[in-house]
Image: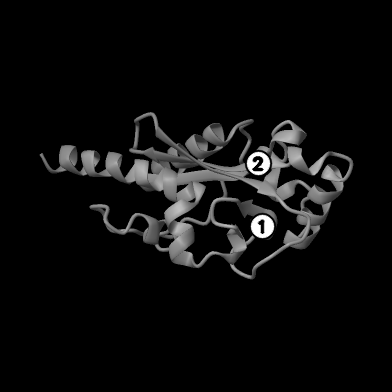
Amino acid sequence: MEFASLLADWPFATVSLEDIGIDTDVAETGSTFAENAALKAASYSSMCGMLTLADDSGLEVDALGGEPGVRSSRYAGPDADDAQRIAFLLQRLNNIDKDEWSARFRCVIAVALPDEAPSLFNGECRGRIIEEPRGDNGFGYDPVFLLPELGKTMAELSSEEKNRVSHRARAAQKASKALKEIAGRVSE
């Protein structure tokens, strides 16, 4: 539960879908991160009758017109692992000048109450893609996503560092403020 650490100061107890006996997967049929996050949050909130937080996130590479985008986890095929996704990404960038390999990780967190439209919170982290994977922390495209201002890839950051600069951290900071407002409304 990565969000539990990102939203440690929020005024609610954190439970997972597994904790409350929900094992249904909500299909991510949206064409944007916002649509997928809202779909999941609204669906799960309706199923459990509780305030629900869901996200959708991925990598957008400028030289590829924003690919892989919402298809980040399926970019190299539905059964590809992280190394295969990275290899496919680098292959797609092979004939493009490395100066154009700017990218961003984007995250949208949706917060939903039963029978209410979800509120959306965006976060992004800008960087660039590098040719050689570096680092053992993280997952997905983290080893080839360089944060120039830190001189490290996402996979070279400690959990604490990542929780300060990542796209999820930035979206979670915004969501945390809204959750505190919701807590105030609920307690009145």
| Crowd around label 1: few <14 · some 14–19 · many ≥20 (10 Å) | some
- Judged from this view, the residue extending furthest toward the bottom is 136
Q: Which image quarter is the N terminus in?
A: bottom left
Residue 68, compared with residue 129, is above or below; it is above
| Residue 83 sits in quarter | bottom right
| Residue 151 sits in quarter | bottom right
Determine if residue 97 is in view: yes
The amino acid type of the residue labelled 2 equals Ala
Residue 86, compared with residue 185, is above or below; it is below
Closer to the camera: disc 2 or disc 1?
Answer: 2
Q: Is residue 54 left or right of residue 50?
A: right
Q: Position of residue 116 (x, y in %)?
A: 34, 30
Of 108 and 47, nearer the camera is: 108
| Residue 119 sits in quarter | top left
Who's the residue at 60% across and 51% down the image?
148
User: Residue 103 has which mark?
Assistant: 2
Say what secondary structure mark 2 lies in: strand
Q: Position of residue 64 (x, y in %)?
A: 76, 35
Disc 1 designates what residue?
Answer: 140
The amino acid type of the residue labelled 1 equals Gly
Q: Which image quarter is the C terminus in?
A: top left
Who's the residue at 73% across and 60% down the image?
82
Q: Position of residue 136 (x, y in %)?
A: 64, 70
- Judged from this view, the residue extending furthest toward the right is 95
